[in-house]
């Protein structure tokens, strides 16, 4: 069932699996402000029984990043240009960027697991969109790059936190500051990619992973994801306590004693 199809974004739901497709292949799925609004809307439209969200893209590239027209003085028709944004107050500029980030935030909700299926180029905003997901299955032709610094900008679409968490500060700094490409083999070796497969097997491998995620009871996966996401911000003793509390909830529910 298709719930959304506009501005280069398509959302379809099949049972417990939602598939969000970037659909601007002629532009290598370069992202626009309208696409970001559509991606945020897709998150709001997800039915409550969706457990896995798959992010994929049409064409040879996952996403070539921000559509460069956004960086021109005129920008997109009917949209504020970067120059317009820069002229706003601090509060207005902060609110605008926060609005753009909404397209990248909902993928990590505790009540679902998100998978990015990445082929070809995932550059800048494309790299950050892949990083917004919990897991990444990559074709062997996948190439990641963070090119914002070469444009005099910084990665601001929620990508810095997961990048550091996945590869560490030093490697994250080197990737961002140089803007170099990270090939699929390196992505798998350093933890950026959970799995690398031949391009022809990308969709099948992603579907297999989705099916494996659905095999476990939903509430157990939700509690486990919450534990893992919060681990970095807790001490060892705090994490032990969080584990005990989560397990107590699971045991009571399994025993029919939950709220």
Image: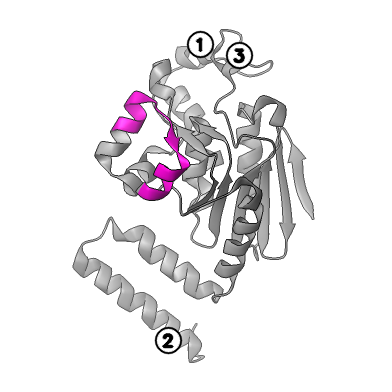
Q: As displayed, is residue 95 above or below residue 51?
A: above
11 relative to 198 in the view: left or right: right
Q: Which residue lies under the disc numbered 2?
A: 251
Q: Nearer the viewer, residue 144 or 6?
A: 144
Image location of residue 109, percent across then percent down: 50, 56
Dot placed on the residue nearer the N-terminal end, 2 or 1: 1
- Say which mark, if any, is on residue 83: 1
Q: Nearer the viewer, residue 94 or 8?
A: 8
Q: Quadrant of the N terminus?
A: bottom right
The reply to whether discs 3 and 1 touch (Cβ–Cβ < 8 Å) is: yes
Element at label 2: helix
Image location of residue 5, percent across then percent down: 76, 41
Dot placed on the residue nearer the N-terminal end, 3 or 2: 3
Query: Label 3, label 2: how many angstroms apart (C-alpha)?
Result: 55 Å
Please say which color scheme the image uses: one colour
Element at label 3: loop
Query: Label 3, label 1: how many angstroms apart (C-alpha)?
Result: 9 Å
Element at label 1: helix
Image location of residue 142, percent across then percent down: 53, 39
Image location of residue 240, percent across then percent down: 25, 72
Query: Label 2, label 1: how many angstroms apart (C-alpha)?
Result: 56 Å
Q: Is residue 185 magenta?
A: yes
Q: As displayed, is residue 99 above or below residue 76?
A: below
Question: Magenta residues, as a range?
Answer: 174-189
- Say which mark, if any, is on residue 75: 3
């Amino acid at each position: 069932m298709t719930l959304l199809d506009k501005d280069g974004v398509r959302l379809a739901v099949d049972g417990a699996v939602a598939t969000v497709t970037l659909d601007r292949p002629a532009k290598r799925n370069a992202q626009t402000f309208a696409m970001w609004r559509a991606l945020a809307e897709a998150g709001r439209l997800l039915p409550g029984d969706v457990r896995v969200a798959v992010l994929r893209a049409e064409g040879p590239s996952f996403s070539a990043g921000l559509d460069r027209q956004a960086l021109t003085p005129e920008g997109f028709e009917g949209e504020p240009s970067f120059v317009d944004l820069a002229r706003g107050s601090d509060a207005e500029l902060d609110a605008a960027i926060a609005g753009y980030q909404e397209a990248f935030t909902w993928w990590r909700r505790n009540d679902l697991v998100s998978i990015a299926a990445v082929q070809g180029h995932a550059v800048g905003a494309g790299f950050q969109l892949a990083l917004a997901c919990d897991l990444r299955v990559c074709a062997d032709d996948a190439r990641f790059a963070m090119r914002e610094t070469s444009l005099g900008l910084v990665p601001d679409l929620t990508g810095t936190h997961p990048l550091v968490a996945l590869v560490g500060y030093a490697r994250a700094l080197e990737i961002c500051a140089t803007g170099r490409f990270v090939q699929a083999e390196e992505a798998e070796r350093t933890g950026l990619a959970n799995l690398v497969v031949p391009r022809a097997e990308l969709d099948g491998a992603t579907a297999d992973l989705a099916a494996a995620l659905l095999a476990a009871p939903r509430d157990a996966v939700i509690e486990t994801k919450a534990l893992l996401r919060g681990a970095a911000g807790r001490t060892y003793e705090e994490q032990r306590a969080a584990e005990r509390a989560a397990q107590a909830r699971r045991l009571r529910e399994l025993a029919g004693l939950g709220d």
